[in-house]
Image (spheres, rainbow, N blue to C red):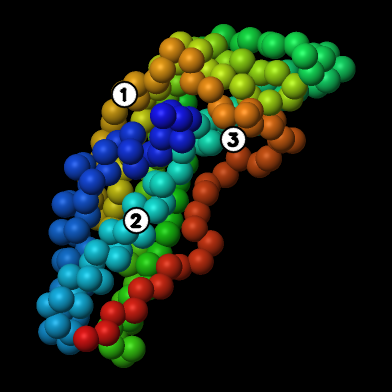
Amino acid sequence: MDESRTTLAEAVEFEATFAEKLTAAVREKLLPFAGHVSGTVFEAAIGKVIEQAAKVLDVPFAELLTGAWERYPEIRELADARLHPSGEETMLELAEHRFAWEYAPKIEIVFNETYPVSIPLGVTVGVKVIGGVLVVQGGRFRELRSGKLEVGVALTVAEQPAGSRIKDVQLPRVLRFGDGVPIRDAVPVGRIATPEPAAVVANS
């Protein structure tokens, strides 16, 4: 098993933690339209919204970590070939630190091509790195050794809370980042949001 591909949804057990509360919140939001379609179509539309919400968390937390770490000057310095030849393995002991991301996907549902409704979701993700040794070689993140993480996720539907979870993530003694993740140039820090609304069409 490649633990570096473990997603946020898996880490916080989305199905067990959020699915029921999120379903209830979405059902309440769509209830005014229930009389315009069959029960089967109504429930299918709710299911599609939950599916889209799960997709937001369907990202390996290792990708989030490496993308955040590369913003630090002291870590980008490890990718400098003038200071660290490609064959050299460099290790950096990590102090406790945190990262946070915000997503604001909006899901558009159209019932019978006549009744449009917008479902605004809010997703807040927090990761606390409690410790570990980061290994860099050849300008790439290679491993996290003895790493400890805590992951938190909170969801809202139309600005109303729909569940939250904070969970310790069990990492292997050595978490390998596949063939290595390149350390890119610095990128601006900011909120992450879904650029376009996801569309769901529900017809009876």
Q: From the viewer's perspective, tell me whether residue 48 is left or right of residue 5.
A: left
Q: Secondary structure at mark 3?
A: helix
Q: Secondary structure at mark 2?
A: helix
C-alpha distance separating marks 2 and 1: 22 Å
Residue 131 visible? The answer is no
At 39% from the left edge and 53% from the top edge, which residue is drawn? 55
Image: 115 above or below 8? below
Closest to the observer: 130 or 156? 130
* Amino acid marked by disc 2: Ala
In which quarter of the view is residue 139 placed? top right
Closest to the observer: 187 or 142? 142
At 16% from the left edge and 66% from the top edge, which residue is drawn? 28
* Amino acid marked by disc 1: Asp
Circle on res. 168: 1
C-alpha distance separating marks 3 and 1: 20 Å
Q: Reading the chain from its start, which is encountered first: label 3 or label 1?
A: 3
Q: Reading the chain from its start, which is encountered first: label 2 or label 3?
A: 2
Specify few, some or many for label 2: CA neighbours under 10 Å numbering under 14, 14-19, or 20 or more.
many
Residue under numbered circle 2: 53
Residue 156 visible? The answer is yes
Verify CB contact (< 8 Å) between mark 3 and mark 1.
no
In this view, the residue farthest toward the right is 82
Q: Position of residue 108 (x, y in %)?
A: 37, 73
Image: 167 above or below 159? above
Residue under numbered circle 3: 67
At 87% from the left edge and 17% from the top edge, which residue is drawn? 82
Q: Position of residue 202 (x, y in %)?
A: 28, 80
